[in-house]
Amino acid sequence: MEISLPQAAEMLHSANTIVLTAHVHPDGDSLGSMLALYAALQADGKKVCMLLDDVVPAMYHFLPNWKKISKPVDNDRFTPDLLVVLDASDIERIGKVQNIVKAPILNMDHHISNTKFADYYYIDSKVAATGEIILALLKLMKSNVTADIGTCLYTAIATDCGFFRYANTSAATLRDAADLVEAGAQPQCISEALEQRSIANLITLTKVLQTIETHHEGKIATMTILPDLLSDPDENTEGFINYARSIEGVEIAILFRAIDERTVRISFRSHRADVSQVALKFGGGGHIRAAGCTVHDTLENAMAQVLPVAVAQIR
Ligand code: 5GP
Ligand code: MN
Ligand code: MN
């Protein structure tokens, strides 16, 4: 059932025990939104915990309370009053948490591809980040937006709009960011923490850059990552795809990351074309200009299937 933001605030107000979760392959928005809501609900005296079916990438270890995020194990069982699912557009995106927590689901999200899977959902695909929704929610709940909450929400918003450069950056996005800086978020510290990478990761980037190929008269650029290219399977390749999109004349950039012989993670970025439609055709989802999916096939077959669908999306 679709609900308004005041109704979402009311649901949180009347729940005593709350589990928060967010999508696997976590990013700044999913983590920042979850950590901000966690801090606000805790200050409100709620019994709240955060479950995430994935590891928190090292680049986000500057976020306050990240260590309180736990990874569920198979025989865990939780029966809170409410399960809040953040920044996730379908139930598969929360992994194991869907089987472990038995509770009504409240989903707060901004993906255009949202499947409306939750018992109660508030979806605003016009905002740049779920973090913008959480800030509006905290204002409605009259929560104190502390410096820590400011740091989490600034990270959520800034990462999802490419530090205020992408098409989803609105005047409201910038006003939200200003409010968060007033609350104590430090833009320079946050961007420095996120920009830092190991020398090994930089070398990985140089190798991935060498795999760039263009297709369809230079309108599509692909990058590929084979499993043995990464020294650590969890190595962060976020941001690599932006180099492919930055090539003059490229409309859609696609990163194919082979996890094993039969699993390929695919990321799409575009300037205008709706890549959420491409990702949806392969069981994934996302936004108009940033989307992703997983194809269970070889890298070669995945590329052969996905490329024509991407081409069809370019008008
Ligand atoms: P990324 O390429 O950074 O993994 O993802 C880009 C966007 O697409 C993000 O907003 C992310 O939430 C969404 N996305 C990525 N992979 C999937 C997927 O497998 N399923 C769905 N529903 N969305 C995805
Ligand atoms: Mn996200
Ligand atoms: Mn998001």
Image (cartoon, rainbow, N blue to C red):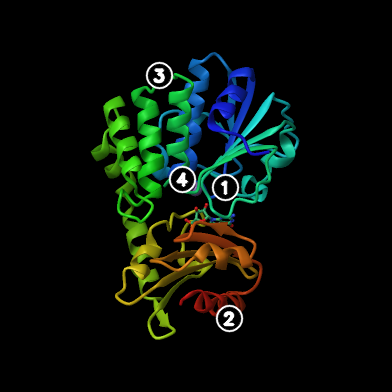
Q: Residues within 10 Å of mark 3 (few under 14, many from 20)?
A: some
Q: What distance separates the C-alpha of mark 3 from that of mark 4?
A: 28 Å
| Residue situated furthest bottom in the rendering | 217
Q: Is residue 67 visible?
A: yes
- Residue 3, horizontal then vertical, whole percent: 61, 35
- Name the residue carrying label 3: 144
23 relative to 78, above or below: below
User: Which quadrant of the view contains residue 79?
Assistant: top right
166 relative to 75, above or below: below
Residue at the spot 33% in from the left edge and 51% down from the top edge: 197
Q: Nearer the viewer, mark 1 or mark 3?
A: 3
For label 1, the SS is loop
- Name the residue carrying label 4: 57
Relative depth, front residue between 32 and 114: 114
Disc 4 vs disc 2: Cβ atoms closer than 8 Å?
no
Q: Earlier in the sequence, mark 3 or mark 2?
A: 3
Q: Nearer the viewer, mark 4 or mark 2?
A: 2
Q: Is residue 71 left or right of residue 178?
A: right
Name the kind of residue labelled 3 in the image. Asn
Disc 1 vs disc 3: Cβ atoms closer than 8 Å?
no
Mark linked to residue 24: 1
Disc 3 vs disc 4: Cβ atoms closer than 8 Å?
no
- Name the residue carrying label 2: 304
- Residue 230, horizontal then vertical, whole percent: 46, 62
For label 2, the SS is helix
Q: What distance separates the C-alpha of mark 1 from that of mark 3?
A: 28 Å
Relative depth, front residue between 262 and 120: 120
